[in-house]
């Protein structure tokens, strides 16, 4: 029953109140339309979906676990990528054209789009949206792409031209996340009183920590859609409680569950899984701090860690143990590179001895998240085997996040990035582990050159070559070691049909209906 | 009684001021701040700084404290950083869950406590009495969350009869709501009930030795009436005080119980506001809890005095 | 706060008391409690001898059911849960045996401080009121966040949580003894405040404090467990009964013994110490 196209990864932090971002890569990870639609769609009805994190109406333009289940039903974007074919399809944009020099783009909009306030959407709203994406207080993961814009010129109510400072290969990563917002009400979104978009559902009510209510937008441009009258998103922070809500029929769909709680549904024909989105768990080290200033020691870590056991015991085997950060199967994802560091404690021990680092104390910073704690337990066990002396520094999430933002995490750290996926070019700047100012304190001219080659690559072949070259360099430097990429799983009862998901695991209920 | 209150007033005010300072400072001493929760872990330092600025977290601590106290005195608890809603609204939206839990636990505590207490004070059979004593000791020694875990194992996993996590408002659906409520309330009530039972039994036994009981017995008052009219009435004092003090503990114990049974009450609100560094919510909760505790303390002192004229209220 | 004269005094009143407390262990309850505590402590502190492999022997045998090889089964990383529970018990007892006496001494001194300065005394009481009023775990959580999770933070939290209990008891003794003739007499004879506090009032506070100490051991263990359940206990891989419960809850339907084992151990420990408190209480009250 499990639909698993690519192990795209989304993340589930099982403890409530923790907020993190989920960013996925264009063209890499996939979600699927859930099950072939059998029967004819029926109008009417209400469903309840459970999610583990609370909504954050303030952060409409940022990928957040608590927004992913509902946000794409209230808001729409210029383009939407087909999760199966990775083809970029028009949504609010009717068509677009990139200039031959790659330095500008003309966009033509649909003329039948209205906001939930009844106002017609115009090119000015698109301009406002893209400009807001670039503001630092928006804190959008892909905001940096919008900063590369020279200008946005509105040429008519339905046309605009964007000029770039340099060719932008990852422009659709930005479009995919830029939920078109209403200029007039955007300031009132924070407390959930006016969350206005153009999507098939209206944002009706937010009870913080408890639920979000969406209602059918009757004036949607496609008169037959949506089929459902309303959707309730119940915030159930505890994974076990989500499962019991699902089992009792109180909810028809659960997002953000932990692997342990999903086991019992795996062979039940009444439920199916959608693997979408996902998380990367890397072990990073600071190359300016002993003993990790020596490359041998960093490489030793690569060989020392039993990634397969992490995947089996912490994630029940659903993830992919890999040395790479890029989406599995994406252009430039080298299969042999992914296995560059096989589990080889003898070799690791020899490397540590050679570097004279045997017995070195290694404090490892770990956020207080169950998965990270479990990974740490295996990692510290592995590191003891090769003669290092690891010790835990468990930080609560707010503390940890703050230090991650500042790039100040000490000699070693086990991170969590809900970002599998954006195109490699985007990941290089959006992943805290890899971006400039990373907590590894790693930067070199060669790294900068190789990164630029990836961002500049404008054909699949060029991308493949550039990414592989960069991977080789990163694997050799070993400043941050990806351990495993795991998919987030959404579980769905067969009483509801037609649910779709975006490339980045946001749920789409526009065409969902209740089975008779 | 009024003089009693007046005498206590300065110390209550002092406690309130001191706890407002602690409630303000302690969460701020912890590393991290509310802007991180909003900006997310992927934010760049520049983005985080912009969000901080927007939240008004850059003012000095003095300013923030006096601003908070000023608003507080005007009945404004401020707005949550994380949820952008007034703190008062947030707290009242979670109140139902916790009050339902604490109220049912209180009822269970009184019923179980009185039953066990009266039984162990009246039973003549030494074996049953010893057995009851053992039961009581076990209840007393087992804290709510262990009882909770055992109940989950027993009634949720081994014999799945009752839902073990989640909740439903009693107002929304009384039957289902009660099903969700009964296990956590029971877990919460049991150890407290054992305390009540023990105190009641001790009090009954000591009252039994008093002359008026012998007199009543000599007058031929039947045992049931003797228990109700004479023994129980005169033993209620300590039990009621215990219930009063325990009611405060019920609220405290609710935090862990809410975590284990996945209930969305004030305890969880407190935990999540610590995690998000949602200072204003946390400050309101801490200050409220301290004041309630002080109030309960005062009320129980008054109750003892009202029940037993031998005790005079002293400042 | 050291008192030079206190040493000889100390010896004089304390020795007979020890004999007095020994009477507690002549009752069935007392004997049972003492035996249980000795056995539990021996098992816990001899863990490195009994299980020389340590608590972190990982294997691929995840979440196995209980067997003769693994009494409680194995955890998600294939470690023996019985071994981890015993080592966990060791952490808890070490924590408690260190923190509870500290809290007892500190709390008693804070409670008696009123003998030296009445104003300071009532100020301290108000501070203790605030600690009591703090909602449930929140004080503990804040302290752990400030100090960083680990042994030190747990010790501080336990010591602080115990202060109000001991402080109030000591204060009650102080208030009841202060008006007694012998204290007034001593005062008029010009005996120093500190000396009155140590020689006359302290001995009277010892009985209830010792009983409260036994009661507080149980609370202390649960403070550790509760903090671990919200994820702020000892640092991995070091086990404590609380961290075992915290991890076990995630596997409660697949491996019930993961939670059951530590729970049962916790209940046994709690029972042993409450019975000890009962036995001591009965002996003390007989006087």
Image (cartoon, rainbow, N blue to C red):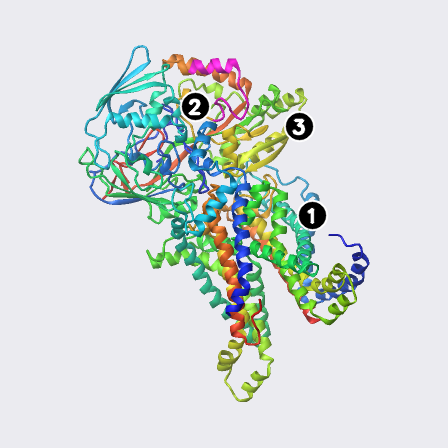
Quadrant in the rendering for residue A77: top left
Instruction: Check the image and report above or below for B62 versus C171.
Output: above
Disc 1 chain ID: C
Instruction: Check the image and report above or below for C264 versus C146.
Output: below
Q: CA distance from mark 2 to mark 3?
A: 33 Å
- Image quadrant for the N terminus of chain A? top left
Q: CA distance from mark 3 to mark 1?
A: 29 Å
Residue corresponding to mark 1: C45
Q: Which residues are magenta?
A: A432-454
Q: Are marks 1 and 2 in contact (CB under 8 Å)?
A: no
Query: Sequence-wise, which precedes: disc 2 or disc 3?
Result: 3
* Numbered label attached to residue A360: 3
A452 in the magenta segment? yes
Residue corresponding to mark 2: A427
Residue A83 seen in the current view: no
Disc 3 chain ID: A
A271 sits left or right of A216 in the view = right
């Amino acid at each position: 029953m499990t639909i698993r196209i690519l192990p795209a990864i989304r993340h589930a932090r099982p403890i409530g109140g923790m907020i993190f971002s989920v960013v996925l890569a264009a063209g890499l990870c996939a979600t699927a339309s859930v099950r072939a639609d059998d029967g004819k769609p029926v109008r009417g009805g209400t469903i309840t979906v459970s999610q583990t994190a609370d909504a954050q109406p303030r952060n409409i333009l940022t990928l957040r676990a608590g927004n992913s289940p509902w946000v794409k039903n209230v808001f729409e974007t210029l383009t939407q990528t087909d999760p199966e074919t990775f083809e970029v399809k028009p949504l609010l944009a009717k068509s677009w054209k990139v200039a031959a020099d790659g330095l500008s783009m003309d966009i033509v909009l649909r003329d039948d789009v209205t906001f939930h306030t009844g106002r017609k959407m115009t090119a000015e709203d698109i301009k406002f949206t893209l400009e807001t994406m670039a503001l630092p207080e928006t804190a959008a993961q892909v905001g940096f792409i919008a900063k590369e814009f020279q200008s946005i010129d509105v040429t008519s109510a339905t046309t605009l031209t964007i000029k770039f400072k340099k060719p932008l290969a990852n422009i659709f990563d930005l479009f995919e996340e830029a939920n078109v917002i209403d200029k007039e009400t955007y300031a009132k979104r924070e407390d959930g009183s006016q969350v206005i978009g153009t999507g098939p559902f209206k944002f009706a009510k937010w009870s913080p920590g408890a639920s979000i209510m969406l209602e059918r937008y009757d004036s949607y441009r496609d008169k037959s859609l949506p089929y459902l009258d309303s959707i309730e998103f119940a915030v159930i922070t505890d994974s076990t409680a989500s499962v019991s809500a699902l089992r009792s029929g109180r909810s028809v769909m659960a997002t953000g569950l932990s692997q342990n709680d999903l086991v019992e549904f795996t062979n039940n024909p009444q439920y199916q899984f959608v693997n979408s989105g996902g998380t990367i768990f890397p072990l990073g080290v600071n190359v300016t701090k002993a003993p990790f200033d020596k490359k041998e020691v960093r490489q030793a870590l690569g060989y020392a860690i039993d990634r397969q056991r992490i995947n089996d015991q912490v994630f029940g085997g659903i993830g992919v143990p890999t040395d790479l950060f890029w989406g599995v199967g994406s252009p430039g994802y080298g299969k042999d590179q992914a296995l560059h560091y096989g589990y080889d404690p003898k070799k690791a021990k020899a490397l540590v001895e050679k570097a004279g680092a045997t017995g070195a104390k290694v404090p490892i910073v770990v956020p207080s998240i169950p998965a990270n704690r479990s990974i740490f337990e295996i990692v510290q066990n592995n590191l003891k085997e090769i003669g290092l002396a690891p010790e835990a520094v468990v930080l609560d999430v707010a503390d940890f996040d703050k230090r991650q933002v500042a790039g100040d995490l000490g000699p070693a750290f086990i991170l969590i990035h809900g970002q599998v996926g954006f195109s490699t070019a985007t990941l290089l700047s959006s992943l805290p582990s890899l971006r400039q100012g990373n907590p590894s304190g790693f930067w070199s001219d060669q790294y900068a050159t190789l990164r630029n080659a990836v961002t500049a690559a404008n054909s699949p072949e060029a991308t493949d070559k550039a990414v592989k070259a960069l991977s080789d360099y990163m694997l050799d430097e070993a400043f941050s070691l990806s351990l495993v990429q795991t998919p987030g799983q959404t579980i769905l009862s067969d009483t509801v049909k037609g649910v779709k998901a975006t490339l980045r695991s946001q749920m789409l209920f526009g065409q969902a209906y209740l089975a008779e | 009684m009024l003089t009693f209150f007046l005498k206590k007033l300065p110390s209550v005010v002092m406690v309130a001021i001191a706890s407002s300072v602690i409630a303000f400072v302690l969460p701020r001493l912890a590393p991290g701040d509310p802007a991180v929760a909003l900006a997310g872990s992927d934010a760049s330092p520049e983005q985080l700084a912009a969000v901080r600025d927007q939240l008004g977290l850059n003012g000095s601590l003095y300013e923030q404290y006096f601003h908070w106290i000023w608003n507080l005195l005007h009945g404004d608890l401020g707005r949550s950083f994380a949820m952008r809603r007034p703190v008062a609204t947030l707290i009242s939206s979670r109140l139902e869950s916790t009050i339902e839990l604490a109220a049912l636990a209180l009822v269970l505590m009184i019923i179980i406590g009185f039953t066990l207490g009266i039984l162990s004070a009246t039973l003549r059979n030494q074996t049953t009495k010893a057995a009851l004593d053992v039961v009581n000791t076990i209840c007393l020694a087992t804290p709510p969350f262990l009882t909770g875990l055992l109940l989950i194992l027993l009634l949720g996993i081994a014999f799945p009869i009752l839902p073990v996590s989640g909740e439903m408002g009693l107002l929304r659906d009384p039957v289902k709501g009660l099903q969700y409520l009964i296990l956590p309330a029971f877990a919460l009530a049991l150890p407290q009930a054992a305390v009540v039972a023990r105190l009641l039994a001790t009090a009954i036994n000591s009252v039994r030795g008093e002359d008026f009981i012998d007199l009543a017995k000599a007058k031929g008052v039947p045992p049931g009436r003797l228990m109700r009219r004479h023994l129980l009435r005169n033993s209620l004092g300590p039990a009621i005080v215990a219930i009063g003090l325990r009611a405060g503990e019920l609220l405290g114990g609710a935090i862990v119980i809410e975590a284990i049974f996945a209930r969305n009450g004030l305890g969880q609100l407190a935990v999540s506001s610590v995690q998000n560094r949602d200072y204003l919510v946390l400050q309101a909760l801490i200050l409220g809890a301290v004041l309630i505790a002080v109030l309960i303390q005062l009320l129980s002192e008054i109750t003892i005095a009202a029940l037993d004229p031998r005790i005079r209220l002293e400042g | 706060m050291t008192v030079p004269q206190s040493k000889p005094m100390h010896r004089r009143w304390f020795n007979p008391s020890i004999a007095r407390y020994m009477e507690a262990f002549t009752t069935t309850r007392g004997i049972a409690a003492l035996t249980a505590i000795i056995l539990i402590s021996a098992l816990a502190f001899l863990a490195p001898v009994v299980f020389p492999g340590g608590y972190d022997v990982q294997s691929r045998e995840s979440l196995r059911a209980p067997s003769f090889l693994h009494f409680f089964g194995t955890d998600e990383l294939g470690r023996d849960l019985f071994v981890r529970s015993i080592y966990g018990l060791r952490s808890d007892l070490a924590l408690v045996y260190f923190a509870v006496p500290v809290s007892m001494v500190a709390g008693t001194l804070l409670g008696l401080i009123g003998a030296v300065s009445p104003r300071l005394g009532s100020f301290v009481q108000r501070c203790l009121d605030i600690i009591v009023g703090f909602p449930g775990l929140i004080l503990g959580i804040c302290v752990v966040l400030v100090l960083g999770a680990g042994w030190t933070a747990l010790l501080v939290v336990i010591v602080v949580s115990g202060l109000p209990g001991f402080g109030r008891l000591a204060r009650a003794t102080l208030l009841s003894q202060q008006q007694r003739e012998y204290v007034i007499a001593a005062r008029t004879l010009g005996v120093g405040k500190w000396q009155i506090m140590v020689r006359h009032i302290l001995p009277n506070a010892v009985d209830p404090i010792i009983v409260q100490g036994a009661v507080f051991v149980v609370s202390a263990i649960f403070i550790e467990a509760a903090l671990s359940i919200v994820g702020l206990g000892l640092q991995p891989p070091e086990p404590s009964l609380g961290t075992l419960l915290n991890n076990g809850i995630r596997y409660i339907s697949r491996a019930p013994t993961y939670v059951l084992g530590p729970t049962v151990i916790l209940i046994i420990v709690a029972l042993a110490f409450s019975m000890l408190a009962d036995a001591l209480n009965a002996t003390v009250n007989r006087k």
